Amino acid sequence: MRTRLLPLLIVLMAGILVALGFPLAVSLAAAQQQKVFVDRIEDATRFAGLAQYVTDASGTPRANESEQRKNLRSDLERYYTVYGIRAGVFDRNEEEIATSNPWHVPVDGEGREAFEDALYSHSSQDPRQIWPWQDHRLYVATPVVRDGDVVAVVLTDSPTGKMRSEILRGWLLIGVGEAAAMLLAIGAALRLTGWVLRPVRVLDTTTHDIATGRLKSRVAVAGGPPELRRLARSFNEMADNVEDVLEQQRAFVADASHQLRNPLAALLLRIELLALDLPEGNAEIASVRTEGKRLAQVLDDLLDLALAEHAEPEGRLTDVGALITERVAAWGPLAADRGVGLRREGLGAVTAWTEPVALSSALDAVVDNALKFTPSGETVTVTVAVDGTETTIVVADGGPGLTEEELTRVGDRFWRSSRHQNVHGSGLGLSITRALLASCGGAIAYAPNEPHGLRVTVTLPRTGPVPALVGGPTD
């Protein structure tokens, strides 16, 4: 979830910063140009005031005021020398009256437009925005008015390199600020997603623990939004109720199995006494004995299942290789008696995090089931391997196997394939195995074994489990 939420927050924050930064950059460029434009207007207005004294009403330079004209030209030249800005006073016919250096009114472009506007007594308006990548010049024109008429025009031609550099420098500062804000936003997004998703991760871990049999796991209600804290408390309440219900069910099964064993034992004893008064080999007595023993086996399996589901063995690092070698050797005589081959394959020395007694009982149930359904002449193999962080034990038999539909039900309580009803069993052996493995952090899976038979895979973690109760300060 974090990989989806974090990019979304970052893109959203980046969009906000761009939405704020773009108008700010445009505003900065406009302000910088406006500052330069106002300065040029003021300069042009000052030159226009001086030009009034060197022209008559027709705009012709006064012959007796050559000194003022010389002073005006001197000011214009000094202005060009200091600022690098060309300035000139031109009459209505575009003839030069005084200029900073020899130049003429542009024949087209913005300079021509500014000059013509000034002839109609219109001061220069704000020109089009000049951007840092545009090597344009800034023209400003101011009319020289005498007795209410425009007799000449002051025109300035400014390079924009410095202005564009200032705009670019301002944009750079904005970019640095945006980058710093983006880094802060990413940090805030990381903190926010961590704060929001930490309770979700804890809840996910605890749910997995409960699903794999660690029913004592609970969510530590700490940190995160109030809604998630309420969810954590509700989850703990639900887990408590589920544990109570399962505990009552286990207690009932265990108590019922235990209480029924004594009356059943007494009943079987009376059957044996009754058999003494009947002819040897009586079919009815033999049938009653068989059903009685089967019922006793079912009660024993129910009790074992209740104990397996209730047990919470402490896992430890176990030499699984040695344990499997021992169990294969123990089942060897029975396999030989049935004419079934039993061999061990794979790694010789391998460890896993499990409870040895629980694993041993689970393996006995799986091997017993494999030998039970494997016909004489076939082979049962027990293979040990390591797959990343897990140790796998595969028990493959050469029996009839199960269909795809039957594979989805194998391990259910009391379930047995309709094709195998003649084989002795209660249908609880693999259920007990699953409970034993779950209690020590393992799992069991079933698949077809080519060309025929059943393939049972027992998976065990190679390291200890994460502590059941997690929580603490928010990240």
Image: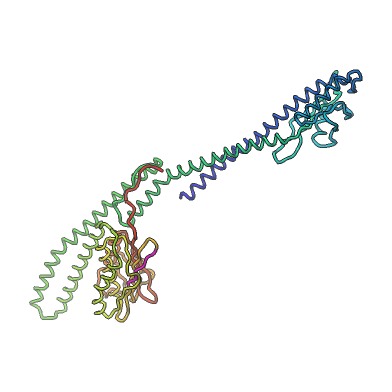
Residue name at image x 86 percent, y 27 percent? 90
Residue 445 quadrant: bottom left
Q: Is residue 167 magenta?
A: no
Please report the residue visible at 26 percent of the width from the left and 57 percent of the height from the top: 314
Drawn side of residue 18 relative to residue 381, left or right: right
Q: Is residue 190 above or below residue 140?
A: below
Asked whether 127 or 304 is in front, the reply is 127
- The percent coordinates of residue 358 (x first, y second) are 26, 62
Return the x and y of residue 404 as percentages of the image width and height: 39, 69
The front one of 335 and 290 is 335
The one nearer the camera, 254 or 107, is: 107
Residue sitting nearer the eye, 183 or 413: 183
Give percent across and percent down for residue 339.
Answer: 27, 81
Q: Position of residue 246 (x, y in %)?
A: 26, 55
The C terminus lies in quadrant? top left
Q: Residue at x 83, y 21 (%)?
A: 71
Locate residue 459: give its quadrant: bottom left
Determine the main secondary structure of the stretch shown in magenta.
Answer: strand
Most distant residue in the left direction: 277
- The quadrant in which residue 110 appears is top right
Is residue 334 depicted above or below 140 in this figure? below
Region of the chain picked out in magenta, as a range: 382-387
Instruction: Tell whether 451 sits left or right of 85.
Output: left
